[in-house]
Every structure is written in C-alpha cells, then in structure tokens.
Amino acid sequence: MPTGAGRRSLPQGSHLCWLLCAFTLRLCQAEAPVRAEKLSVSTSNLPCWLVEEFVVAEECAPCSNFQAKTTPECGSTGYVEKITCSSSKRNELKSCRSALMEQHLFWKFEGAVVGVALVFACLVIVRQRQLDRKALEKVRKQIESI
C-alpha cells in the first residue's frame, strides 16, 4: 500500500488558506522589530504623566470656554485636571472624566436600554396577538368543517 493512500487530501481552498495564514504570520514577524524600534524613541515629547509618577494638584473640573479652544486636553472630554509630575516637577494639564459626566452617560445608556426593551416588548405583544388570531381562525375553520 503506498504511503498516504488512506489519507484524504486537503481541498484546494484549504491550501490557499494555509498559504495565506503563513504569509500573514511571516509579515507580522517582519513588522515586530519595527514596532520595538518605535517604542524606543525618546520620551521627551510625551507628557510626563505617561512616563513617571504624578500628583493631582487640582481635581477634575470642566474647561472654560477659553481653555476649550486653546488647550488640546479639553477637546476629548471637556474636563481637565492639573497635575504635578514627581521627578521632573513639571505642572501639566491632563484630560479626565468627571463623575457627573459619567453619571449622565450612565443614565443616557440606561434610558436607551429601557427604550429598546419597551419597543421589543411591544413588538412581542403585537406578534403574539397575531399568532393568537391565526390559531383561533384555524380552530373555527376546523369546527365549521365538522
């Protein structure tokens, strides 16, 4: 008996799939050292709170209209806190999320969930009534035909 006579061969599509997987894996391995080099770039242009310990000097507060236009940290959340980095002693602004904003987002999400639940509950009730009517019509037809 020849070797491999009892084994099934992979379909043509599977060969292509394995080839594509091998190529993707090789491509990812080739890019890995590039990513490591990018991480070793100087940290001088990064905010100090990303690379060292910091202390919050002023708690999270909403940005003023002037800050919102001039400070990029205010752009994402609309709130900012002042921090002091421990080793460099630099004072910087850091974007933050306030508890009040989180509470508003939570209740908006809860309201959306309740609204969707009510819509689907109404759809279930309407569909159940349709099915009940169809079932009653079938029973009436069966009784009439007797």
Image (cartoon, rainbow, N blue to C red):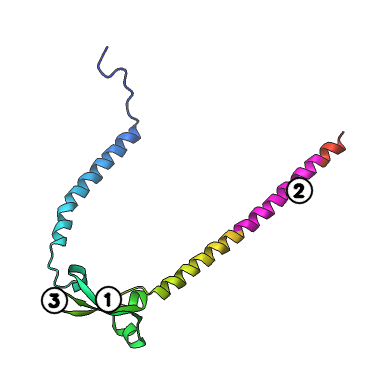
Query: In the drawing, does residue 46 fall left or right of residue 8?
Result: left
Name the image quarter holding residue 146: top right
Image position, residue 117 (x, y; %):
58, 59
| Kind of residue sitting beneath label 2 | Arg
Which residues make up the magenta segment?
120-139
Sequence-wise, the earlier of marks 1 and 3 is 3
Nearer to us: label 2 or label 1: 1
Task: From the image, tell me which residue sits under label 1.
Answer: 94
Nearer to us: label 3 or label 2: 3
Q: CA distance from mark 1 to mark 3?
A: 16 Å
The overriding secondary structure of the stretch rendered in magenta is helix
Q: CA distance from mark 3 to mark 2?
A: 76 Å
Image position, residue 8 (x, y; %):
33, 23
The disc placed on residue 133 is 2
Q: CA distance from mark 2 to mark 1?
A: 62 Å
Task: From the image, tell me which residue sits under label 3.
Answer: 88
Circle 2 crowding by C-alpha within 10 Å: few under 14, some 14–19, many from 20: few
Magenta run includes residue 128: yes
- Secondary structure, mark 2, is helix
Image position, residue 20 (x, y; %):
28, 42
